[in-house]
Amino acid sequence: MDQILVLTNVPDQTVAVNLAEYLVEQGLAACVNILAPCTSIYHWQGKTESTQEIPLLIKTTQARYMEIEAAICKHHPYELPEIIHVPIAGGLPAYLQWVSEETSR
């Protein structure tokens, strides 16, 4: 399967919506889920930080990953954005086909 799930967190709803719309409109993602705010705790530049973030679940294909990564880096306000992708090992075949079709236009 070529479909992947890309995970990233952004600082606010405006960035989340703008990034999600860009990825879908450009055909880089079939769908982006904007989740409820969460608290992220992490170590950065020598100290422990805590901040509210908005998680995004981006459904796309391996073939579009590098473009997704570049788009997130370009439109993300963080110096070092979290960008993780995981393979989709299975799912409803018709849905996975739709992901592939939407990201190949």
Image (cartoon, rainbow, N blue to C red):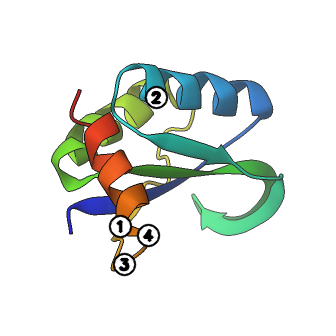
Label 4 close to label 2 by CB (< 8 Å) = no
Mark 4: amino acid: Leu
- Identify the residue at horizontal 44%, vertical 20% (top origin): 25
| Residue at figure coordinates x 72%, y 39% from the top left | 11
Mark 2–mark 1 Cα distance, whole angstroms, equals 21 Å
Mark 4–mark 3 Cα distance, whole angstroms, equals 7 Å
Question: Compared with residue 35, is residue 40 higher up or lower down, i.e. above or below?
Answer: below
On residue 93, the disc is 1
Q: Quadrant of the N terminus?
A: bottom left
Q: CA distance from mark 3 to mark 1?
A: 8 Å
Which residue is nearer to you in this view: 19 or 48? 19
Q: Return the residue nearer the eye: 9 or 95.
A: 95
Q: Which residue is mark 3?
A: 90
Q: Residue furthest bottom?
A: 89
SS of the residue at dot 1?
helix
Give residue 92's mark: 4
The location of residue 71, given as percent across then percent down, is 37, 29
